[in-house]
Image: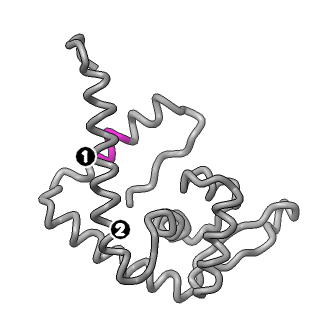
Amino acid sequence: MSNVPGASADLLRSLTRAERLLSRRLGAVLADDELSIEAWRVLCLLADGQGHPMSEVSAEASLPPGTLTKLVDHLVDRNLVFRRIDPIDRRRIRAYLTTRGRREHARLDERVRASLAELGVEQAADLVSQLGGLIGRLDPARPREHAH
């Protein structure tokens, strides 16, 4: 941050506005497939194939557990996600993409990337890296953000 008065407010305002506008744009891309931004965040997290505990999915998708459960139920009904008991900690449930979910994520990821390319966001990787660094400094206990 600089010593310029208002710089921190400008950063917060700019990040908030960019997130809202980007969500609106990507929401329009995902609307054809009747997916919300929140559903997209879940698919992106699960796309690594490792399966994630529902508590982690809740945190990464910025959704309270009850809302996440309803969303994941919807994704299960669409055969995009499935749940399994964690083999190590049988008290936990892990979520995974189905084969169809992996195909849909890959297809939608191409559309999302094309939409971003239309914006001329050539330095997106640099921006994501800088924001990831900022997030890491603000919340060092949280894993690095996913680049979707």
Q: Residue 95 carries which label?
A: none
Q: Which of marks 1 and 2 is in front?
A: 2
Q: Compared with residue 98, is residue 116 higher up or lower down, i.e. above or below? A: above
- Local packing at callout 1 (Cα closer than 10 Å; few below 14, some 14-19, many 20+) is few
What residue is shown with label 2?
A: 27
Q: Is 9 in the magenta?
A: no
Which image quadrant for residue 4?
top left
Q: Give the residue displayed 83% in from the left and 62% down from the top.
A: 88
Question: Considering only order in the chain, which callout, 2 or 1, is on the residue closer to the N terminus?
Answer: 2
Q: Compared with residue 145, is residue 51 higher up or lower down, i.e. above or below? A: below
What residue is shown with label 1?
A: 126
Q: Compared with residue 108, is residue 133 higher up or lower down, i.e. above or below? A: above
Which image quadrant for residue 148?
bottom left
* Disc 1 and disc 2 in contact, CB within 8 angstroms: no
Q: Give the residue displayed 53% in from the left and 33% down from the top.
A: 139
Q: Give the overall secondary structure of the magenta segment.
A: helix
Q: What residue type is labelled 2?
A: Gly
**Residue 39 seen anywhere in this rendered image of the structure:** yes
Q: Residue 8: image x %, image y %?
A: 31, 22
Which scheme is used to colour this image of the protein? Answer: one colour
Q: Is 129 in the magenta?
A: yes
Report the label total. 2
Q: Residue 25: image x %, image y %?
A: 27, 64
Measure how far apart labels 1 and 2 are at the Cα level: 23 Å
Q: Give the residue displayed 44% in from the left and 80% down from the top.
A: 34
Could you say whether the residue bearing mark 2 is in a helix, strand or loop? helix
The part of the chain drawn in magenta is 127-131
Q: Give the residue displayed 55% in from the left and 51% down from the top.
A: 62
Q: Which amino acid does label 1 sit on?
A: Asp
Q: Residue 10: image x %, image y %?
A: 25, 28
Q: In this view, does 136 lie to the left or right of 81?
A: left
- In front here: 20 or 107? 20
